[in-house]
Image (spheres, rainbow, N blue to C red):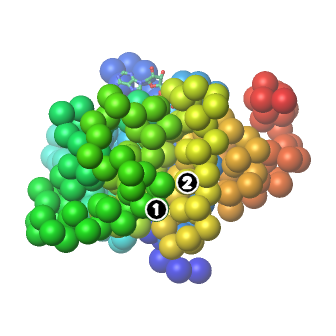
């Protein structure tokens, strides 16, 4: 097997008194497509926010590309292992959120160009070229000069994907990206994700309640329950032939 692109070693996360993640061990291979499923509040979003470095673990270790993200300080606090590493790691990871998080005062094109210029120090020209390529990929070449509030939810979500893709991440994280959309707009967003999955190179972690879609595109499905990984296997094993009663019970809500 190749070197994992990301690894969690006994990762815990608490918010105040609440233990949200209780010892997560997880390796993500380059190019792997993972669907993360589980009841609301089980910690799915927290798992991917940790990888995006939007949250710090309370205990444990995480690596991206073999680089340690955090280290233990004297008084048992975790701190960034190395600011330069952290910046590099952030460049390897892209995330798309449930509520788009576009910059409202920037056009579609400017939204995409912003990170390559400010984070990667790309020239404006090169950022424009890559942004236009990615906007074409998500089918929005004719919307580049519009502002987010002139777009439908599905279009906004596709801009958010183009914006993340411009950074050429090695891992893309999708946090329930269709759950804020009107039902008729879900398809166009899933279609783009499917295309990205077919491209192959990028690892993808999708928090999703779209079970049929997960069966379709995921290599691997992880069932999280109360902060613990309770099942981890192929879509056939986890979704189509679930073993545990708890998993069967969870899945029965989607039938
Ligand atoms: P899921 O994505 O599976 O619904 P989350 O990871 O969003 O679960 O949340 C897991 C638990 O952690 C929930 O009980 C939630 O209220 C809590 N939580 C998440 N983020 C915070 C935060 N910033 N502060 C306090 N509690 C939080």
Pointer 2: residues within 10 angstroms few (<14), some, or many (20+)?
Answer: some
Furthest residue in direction top, as rendered: 17
Some atom of ligand 1 lies within 8 Å of the CB belonging to the residue at label 2: no
**What residue is rendered at 50% in x and 37% in y?**
154
In what quadrant of the picture does the C terminus appear?
Answer: top right
Q: Is residue 178 left or right of residue 118?
A: right
Query: Decide: marks 1, 2 in contact (CB < 8 A)?
Result: yes
Q: Which mark is residue 57?
A: none
Label 1 sits on a secondary structure element that is helix
Above or below, comparing residue 61 to residue 209 in the picture: below
Quadrant where ligand 1 appears: top left
- Residue to which mark 2 is pinned: 192
Nearest the viewer among 254 and 181 is: 181
Can the viewer see residue 76 in this picture?
A: no
The percent position of residue 210, horizontal first and vertical second, equals 68, 39
Can the viewer see residue 73 in this picture?
A: yes
Above or below, comparing residue 100 to residue 205 in the picture: above
The percent position of residue 51, horizontal first and vertical second, equals 38, 50
- Residue to which mark 1 is pinned: 137
Q: Is residue 24 left or right of residue 168?
A: right
Question: Splitting the image into 4 quarters, where does residue 152 fall?
Answer: top left
Residues under labels 1 and 2: Cα distance?
8 Å
Furthest residue in direction front, as rendered: 142
The percent position of residue 82, horizontal first and vertical second, equals 16, 60
In what quadrant of the picture does the N terminus appear?
Answer: bottom right
Label 2 sits on a secondary structure element that is helix
Above or below, comparing residue 227 to residue 142 in the picture: above
Q: Of the two numbered discs 1 and 2 on the same chain, state the one appearing first in sequence.
A: 1
Nearest the viewer among 32 and 12 is: 32
**What residue is rendered at 78% in x and 48% in y?**
238
**What residue is rendered at 22% in x and 63% in y?**
128
Label tally: 2
């Amino acid at each position: 097997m190749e070197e994992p692109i990301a690894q969690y070693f006994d990762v815990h996360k608490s918010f105040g008194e609440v233990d949200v993640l209780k010892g997560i061990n997880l390796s993500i291979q380059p190019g792997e497509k993972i669907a993360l499923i589980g009841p609301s509040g089980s910690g799915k979003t927290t798992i991917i926010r940790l990888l995006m470095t939007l949250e710090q673990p309370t205990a444990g270790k995480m690596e991206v590309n073999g680089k340690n993200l955090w280290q233990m300080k004297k008084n048992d606090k975790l701190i960034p292992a190395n600011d330069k590493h952290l910046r590099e790691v952030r460049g390897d990871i892209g995330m798309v959120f449930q509520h788009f998080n576009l910059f409202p005062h920037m056009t579609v094109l400017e939204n995409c160009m912003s990170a390559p210029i400010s984070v990667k120090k790309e020239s404006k020209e090169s950022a424009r070229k890559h942004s236009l390529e990615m906007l074409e990929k998500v089918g929005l070449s004719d919307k580049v000069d519009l502002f987010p509030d002139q777009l439908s939810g599905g279009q906004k979500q596709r801009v958010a994907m183009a914006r993340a893709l411009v950074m050429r991440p090695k891992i893309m994280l999708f946090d329930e990206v269709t759950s804020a959309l009107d039902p008729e707009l879900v398809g166009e967003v899933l279609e783009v994700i499917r295309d990205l999955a077919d491209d192959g190179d990028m690892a993808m972690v999708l928090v999703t309640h779209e079970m049929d879609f997960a069966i379709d595109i995921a290599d691997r499905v992880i069932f999280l329950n109360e902060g613990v990984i309770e099942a981890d296997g192929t879509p056939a094993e986890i979704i189509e032939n679930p073993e545990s009663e708890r998993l069967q019970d969870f899945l029965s809500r989607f039938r």
